[in-house]
Amino acid sequence: MSLPLVCVTLTGCTVDEMLKDAARATAVGADIVEVRLDKLWTVEQKPEPIEPTNKPGDDRRKSVYVAPDYLPQPLDSVDLDSSLISFRTGIELPVILTCRPERQGGYYPGSEKERIAVLSKAIKSGVSWIDLEIDIDTKERNKLVKLANDKTKIIASSHYDKSPNSSEDIIDDISTNSSLGDITKIVFNTNGKKDAMKLFDIAWDTRDSDDNITIMGMGAGGDWTRIHAPLLNQKMVYTTMENGWHLSQQGRINASDLKIAWDLLEYSN
């Protein structure tokens, strides 16, 4: 059983923060890291601490997690050329450059035309991988694919702000879009066991496909396809260097914890 590539999505909103996280990812044996360029145009605003709560008669104090806000910054606040050089020279591992638009849950504050220019510069920087959303205007996307020219591999991604719908429709979409990149990445919101099982079933039904696929959820149960990715023949698993109980509620998983899980499940043998 071959193991998927372990990708760590770097945390932080500055180049220095991401470089430090990349060093940690290298130390734990990640195969690749994802740089979220769109987060460079944000400032993280941490929430006010909330006291743990407990129900009457329950002596266990339950922690409350509140996600930070990311405040958009002016486009001219980022020196993109300098940032790309820093990522190219400061990260040992192969890199995926992503500039996620707001329509797919990202933070880039500019227009689509300006975002396409960012992606173009990212490809020209000589990066190993580029994330190109499937819903990019076909003409503009074809230009970016031509620019990549097999020197930069492509993640063809779709992020849906809804729960998974018909399994048959999703599988058809995966098959239709498989030619748009070297890996097809599909992400849905998951709100518990029902959604998680649907994504698991889709991954199971496509495990023998010749296409390179990565399927995951964001939300409770979204980590099922990540934990069992070797069994499901997933090509790549997205992880984090963050720690905390809140990760499972977000469908995410720490890279070291994932490797431990694979060992315990004997996927690494």
Image (cartoon, rainbow, N blue to C red):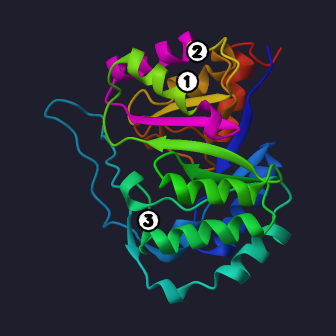
Which label is found at residue 107? 3
Q: Residues within 10 Å of mark 3 (few under 14, many from 20)?
A: many
Q: Is residue 254 one of those drawn in magenta? A: no
Foreground residue, 82 or 226? 82
Question: Of callouts 1 and 3, which one flags the residue occurring earlier in the amino acid sequence?
Answer: 3
Which quarter of the rendered picture does the C terminus lie within?
top right
Which residues are the magenta region?
178-205
> Closer to the camera: disc 1 or disc 2?
1
Q: Is residue 123 left or right of residue 142?
A: right
Residue 207: where, in percent of width, then height?
Answer: 63, 14
Foreground residue, 188 or 196? 188
Q: Which residue is rendered at x = 72% and y = 63% of the image? A: 123
| Residue underneath mark 2 | 206
Marks 1/3 in contact by CB < 8 Å: the verdict is no
Q: Is residue 27 left or right of residue 246?
A: right
Q: Which residue is rendered at x = 48% and y = 20% of the image? A: 171
Q: Amino acid at mark 2?
A: Thr
Foreground residue, 241 or 205? 205
Residue 255: where, in percent of width, then height?
Answer: 67, 40
| Residue underneath mark 1 | 175
